[in-house]
Amino acid sequence: MRIINVIVKVLTFPAAFLKGFWEQRICRMMGIPVESKKIFQSGEMAGHIEHELFRSPSKSFRFCFFSGLMVFLAGVIMAFPGLICVYLGSAGFMKWFALACLGNAAMMFTNIFPSIGDAIEMWENYKKMGTAAKIFLAPAAAIMYVGAYAETWGITLLTNYGLAVLLFLI
């Protein structure tokens, strides 16, 4: 499991770096001390930073959600020109530009989920929330929790690059 995660992070290193950058920024905005700023390390924390545990359920959820959201938005910004080129039927250089944009977007979409440790902590803190918050945040919490495991096993890399190739071939 660790080696698969490290390989995925090496293949998608710009997105892994961006994810680690946003995790660090959000920790600083919320006043959570960062223990280790190393983004590229072997093991389950590859592409993530080590930080103190979150005391409140809302901080844990916001950390997991917004760090992934920022990387997702970067992926959307990169995918947009590529999709325009693909659907306009571009040829030559623009076709390669579209492929590069879709490949970079797939890198970003591969790294939108939190680490396993953050997902487990978020899920445990989610159980402490009130009933209204649980109902409202349930879909996002479940997606982040399952996505963290999918990212660890490299499933997100396969699905995102498969989708990018499928869009390119259409």
Image: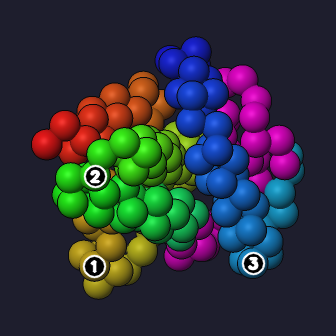
Residue 29's disc is 3
Q: Is residue 52 magenta?
A: yes
Question: Which residue is drawn at the image coordinates 42% and 27% (left, top)?
Answer: 154
Residue 72 lies, in percent from the top left, at 45, 61
Residue 42 lies, in percent from the top left, at 72, 23
Upstream in sequence: badge 2 or badge 1: 2
Which quadrant, please, contains the C terminus? top left
C-alpha distance separating marks 3 and 2: 43 Å
Q: Is residue 69 magenta?
A: no
When asked about the image quadrant of residue 70, the answer is bottom right
Question: Which residue is drawn at the image coordinates 69% and 70% (left, top)?
Answer: 26
Residue 60's disc is none
In this rendering, does residue 136 appear at all? yes
Residue 90's disc is 2
**What is the three-letter code of the residue carrying label 3?**
Met
**What is the three-letter code of the residue carrying label 1?**
Phe
